[in-house]
Image (tube, rainbow, N blue to C red):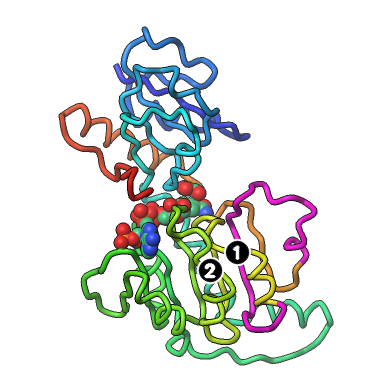
Amino acid sequence: MTRILFYLDEPGKEIWRPAFEAAIPGVEFREYPDWGTPDDGPAYVFAWEPEPGLIAKYPNVKTIFSLGAGVDHLTSDPDLPADVPIVRMSDMGLKEGMAEYVLMTVLMYHRYMPRMLASQRKHEWRRLFPPAASDVRVGILGYGALGHYCAQALKPLGYQLASWSRTAKPEEDGIRHYSGEEAFEDFLARTDILVGLLPSTPETTGLLNSRTMALMPRHAAIINAGRGSLINLGDLVSALDSGHLSGATLDVFVEEPLDENNPLWSHEKVFITPHIASITRPTTAAEYVAENIKRIESGLQPQNVLDRKRGY
Ligand code: NAP
Ligand code: GLV
């Protein structure tokens, strides 16, 4: 029998049990704190931000499934067992959700929506004429599962697309790939709307700062749906206030929830969403976990295992 130890401290979490019961017939779905004891036999953890030290108390855990694509909510636990594989979420629901968010926000900047809203607040009939999509350069920072899927969703709109990632990517119609530190500046210099979809690692921390944002074209906009550590927020505010950057949409922050007194909330060029760019969807996520458990139990490697050295 498959035993899932589930941890999620969010309202509405009761939707997960039926999803797992449908994906894994006969599953023993144990929701924290009802995790039983290690003597209950082998188990899989499926969790988001579990209490530090909790998983280490269960040496019967064979694999940890991250409820999200990111794993910082797990690896921040100093007692996380070093030898238990971690499988990162990468189901269709997560990709579709992120593509929706990225399409919405890219279109918002391309079509001058923030400026239209500002005019509306002043009751001002101000007709602005956006460029053709083919004249707008969108750059995706991080070309993994989500970056790739979002690029495919943006393609039919006709933008000039580029990506930046750690390792080189094969040539692809309609998208220019940049890779490695040496190509970062060229990537920024050609990017009018930047979409951040990078994991949080020591290498990605603070990549967007006063020096690198200054390399972006004047009036460029930034959308960050990866992790908050990507951006130095003080430098971002300076770049917005000086008029160098035209706007920023931020879904993720180093400290969440964002403090209610943080001045970013009322910055006229900033849109804030509360880490909802893409929320893991129970049906597709439970099917993804079920598929990977099948692989593990037939002696195969699960998909998308965290490389702990790389950090993603
Ligand atoms: P992924 O498939 O692992 O892709 C990560 C991408 O980042 C890869 O292209 C990787 O390069 C690139 N990368 C990593 N370190 C880099 C570095 N130092 N320099 C340049 N590129 C680097 O991950 P994913 O599934 O697309 O998810 C990406 C992130 O999105 C997650 O880690 C999570 O933090 C975030 N996320 C946010 C939400 C939300 O709601 N806001 C939802 C889901 C996920 P290579 O291709 O060369 O390996
Ligand atoms: C959400 O932030 C995720 O990592 O899936």
Please state the extent of the stretch shown in magenta in the rendering: 241-266
Rendering coords of residue 177 (x, y %) = 31, 75
Q: Please say whether residue 5 is one of the residues in the magenta stretch.
A: no
Is the residue marked by circle 2 packed among few (<14), some (14-19), or many (20+) residues within 10 Å? many
Placement of 81 over or under 162, stated as above or below = above
- Quarter of the figure that contains the N terminus: top left
Q: For the point 43% across and 32% down, which residue is it? A: 19
Measure the C-alpha gap from mark 2 to mark 1. 6 Å
Disc 1 CB within 8 Å of nearest ligand 1 atom:
no
User: Dot 1: what SS?
Assistant: loop
Placement of 260 over or under 165, stated as above or below = above
Residue 158 visible in the displayed image: no
User: Three-letter amino acid code at disc 1?
Assistant: Asn
**Dot placed on the residue nearer the N-terminal end, 2 or 1:** 2
Q: For the point 56% across and 72% down, which residue is it? A: 222
Between 106 and 86, the one nearer to me in the picture? 86
Placement of 193 over or under 147, stated as above or below = below
Is the residue marked by circle 1 packed among few (<14), some (14-19), or many (20+) residues within 10 Å? some
Rendering coords of residue 259 (x, y %) = 74, 50
Residue 206 visible in the displayed image: yes
User: Dot 2: what SS?
Assistant: loop
Q: For the point 25% across and 38% down, which residue is it? A: 302
Rendering coords of residue 141 (x, y %) = 43, 67
Between 94 and 239, the one nearer to me in the picture? 239
Between 78 and 294, the one nearer to me in the picture? 78
* Mark seen at residue 232: 1
Pointer 2 and pointer 1: residues touching (CB < 8 Å)? yes
Number of marks drawn: 2
Per the image, the residue denoted by label 2 is 208
In the image as oriented, which residue stretches furthest toward the top? 39
User: Three-letter amino acid code at disc 2?
Assistant: Leu
Q: Please say whether residue 245 is one of the residues in the magenta stretch.
A: yes
